[in-house]
Image: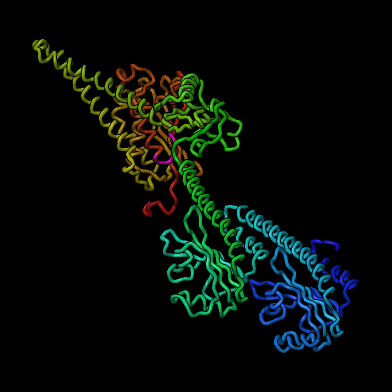
Amino acid sequence: MISSLEVNDVFPRCADQIARLIPFDRLAIVLVDEDAGTKTDAYSVGVDIPGQEPGTVTPLADSIAEEILNSGKPLLLGAVELAERAEKYPGSRARVDHGLNSLIAVPLLWRGHPIGYLNIRSAQDDAYGADDIKLATLIAAQIAGNVAASILYARSEKESASRKELAEIGRIITSSHDVDAVCERFANQARELIPFDRIGISLLEPDRVTIVDTFVSGVEMAGYTAGKRYVVDETSHRGVIRDRLSTTSVSDGRVGPAQAIDAQKCAVRSGLKSLLITPLISQGKVIGTLTLRSKSENAYGPSEIQIVEQISDHIAGTISISRLYRSLQESEEHYRDLFENAVEMIQTADLEGNILYVNQAWLRKLEYESSDVSSMTIWDIVHSDSQDHCRKIIARILRGESVGEFDAVFRTKMGKKVFVRGTENCGFDDGQPVATHGIFSDVSARLEMERMKEEFVSMVSQELRTPLTSIRGSLGMLASGQLEDKPDQARRMLEIASANTDRLSRLIDDILDIQRIEAPVVDIVLAAVDSRGLIEQATEEMRSFADEAMVQLDASGCRAWVMADRDRVVQTLTNLISNAVKFSEPDSVVKIGCREETESVKFTVSDSGRGIPPEKIETIFERFQQVDSSDSRDKGGTGLGLAISRLIVEQHGGELTVESEMGVGSTFMFRLKRALESDIPAAH
């Protein structure tokens, strides 16, 4: 007999061989499924009998087939016996009615277990004898072997295909950390393994009391959609979650609590009759369920449960990984936001110093673009003043030493110094250093404030000490009685004390002025003011001071209106006039004026004094600064007038500048915005 692993090849060849050995009018090979209690006409040739075509499935009970399989022995029947069996087994009457009067039926046994039978019939009465039975038995044994082999092969192929499908499902499910992105692809692939008309994935909420339909696909069930939440104890999931076992049932709308009944009724109305629910278990904990529904009755049995449980393992693992990934991603985003929005400068570098990461504050402070960083090292931003110090710090942290806060000097892309204070530490992997991490604050402004504070204290103490020393000396001489008989000299000492007292008063007033002007709570009150009136008022206030110095004041100007705080601008002009008078020679002229421009009015105060050295042009606007250290003593003043004037002009939105030529004189100037017609008082 020619063997084959394909059943469809085996049966025709068996029939050809039997035809040469045993004459027949109809030959059939029937396979049985004892578990299901059915038999299937797998192959037939010869007389056609309606209702017994290949592939027809009929009950095994109450048939000649059941008799043969129960006995396990061949059966030889003639016309009389067949007529009797037709009365006993109505399913056999069709063959008798078609004139098939002789029968040889031989069980197909595989390892002692019946898998079917060989059915040979002839139209002749008593056509077969004992020799035919022996021959048919031998042939049946060969057929059984081939059928068993082909069944095993088909089962193996099916299992192989199932394994491939499961592997593909596993690949799809684990191909992404986004469960929503793979569910639809997974559902389509799962249909190749197990039939369903609706599939759903439901996940337990952290409270483990509520369950959410996370994904659904297939036939719609009114009221049951993705995203809807239910109380577990009011659903069909409750037993599966509690017992951690899969379950199958037919939805008939008659069992379970109210919510479960509603779900079953919805399923029945949607034509869904079979239900399979399996738990999704990850790390020993139920996290949800996988639900399949089918329009067929009894669609799910042990083999389907086994497949679905394998699928559920993949899904549960992917969901857990997805949750972990999402949690890590959220943590990463949270910390990235903290780093990116931090005011501190944050940097990470490898062991060679190549910069791996910097935050936005780092880029802003050092004036770099993100594209610059990839090719930079930390030594590109450490100023030469700090290179040695920082290299020693890095060496220490690479050895695992703890380093506290330290100061360093960085440099911007344009080479500007940035004074920083911060910490540096090292990341280790298996005891080996892998990267350095630094967090720094820009302390340039703080250091500048400290420097200015020190200078301020030093200057104020010096400015206070000089007049106080003079006052103390003068009063000391008077108190000692040394000048009792020298009234002129005593009067001179009192004049010196009085002058120095005035100087101290002016110093305190100027310091308070600066404090008030710089304080954010003090506002400049702007109004439309006549520029010529400002010049005239300031000039008149300084007239007596100029006359005493024998300096002439020449005031002139335009009649333009500006937006200004009258008192503050007059204070600025008097400061500038006072400064010009002090540094002018007797019989010289100080000129005060203004000139209209397109959007502003330019004010100027000019003298013909000694002039200001170029290197002193900016420093004279700083507090307690004079062109010469002896000016405070010889010319009077506190060294705060120009600093106050500049602050006032800046609060008006302008800038106070000076042009000077040694031996020729100086001109101080500033601009104020012109007033709109609508701002000018109607009376003018």
User: Is residue 294 left or right of 233 when viewed as pictured?
Assistant: right
323 or 83, which lies in front? 83
Q: Main secondary structure of the magenta part?
A: loop
**Position in image of residue 129 (x %, y %):** 84, 77
Task: Determine the residue located farthest toward the right in the rendered image.
Answer: 20
In this rendering, is residue 666 above or below 317? above
Quadrant housing residue 250: bottom right
Quadrant housing residue 479: top left
Q: Residue at x 52, y 63 (%)?
A: 289
Q: Residues in magenta?
A: 651-656
In this rendering, is residue 315 above or below 463? below
Quarter of the picture holding the N terminus: bottom right
- Tell me, yes or no, if residue 313 can be seen here: yes
**Position in image of residue 583 (x %, y %):** 37, 22
Q: Residue at x 38, y 48 (%)?
A: 528
**Position in image of residue 608 (x %, y %):** 42, 23
User: Is residue 496 left or right of 371 when viewed as pictured?
Assistant: left
Total marks in image: 0
User: Is residue 217 left or right of 46 when viewed as pictured?
Assistant: left
Quadrant housing residue 490: top left
- In this picture the colour scheme is rainbow
Q: Is residue 409 magenta?
A: no
Q: Is residue 652 magenta?
A: yes
230 or 444, which lies in front? 230
Q: Residue at x 82, y 66 (%)?
A: 10
413 or 672, which lies in front? 413
580 or 148, which lies in front? 148
**Position in image of residue 151 (x %, y %):** 73, 64
In this rendering, is residue 145 above or below 197? above
- Tell me, yes or no, if residue 380 can be seen here: no
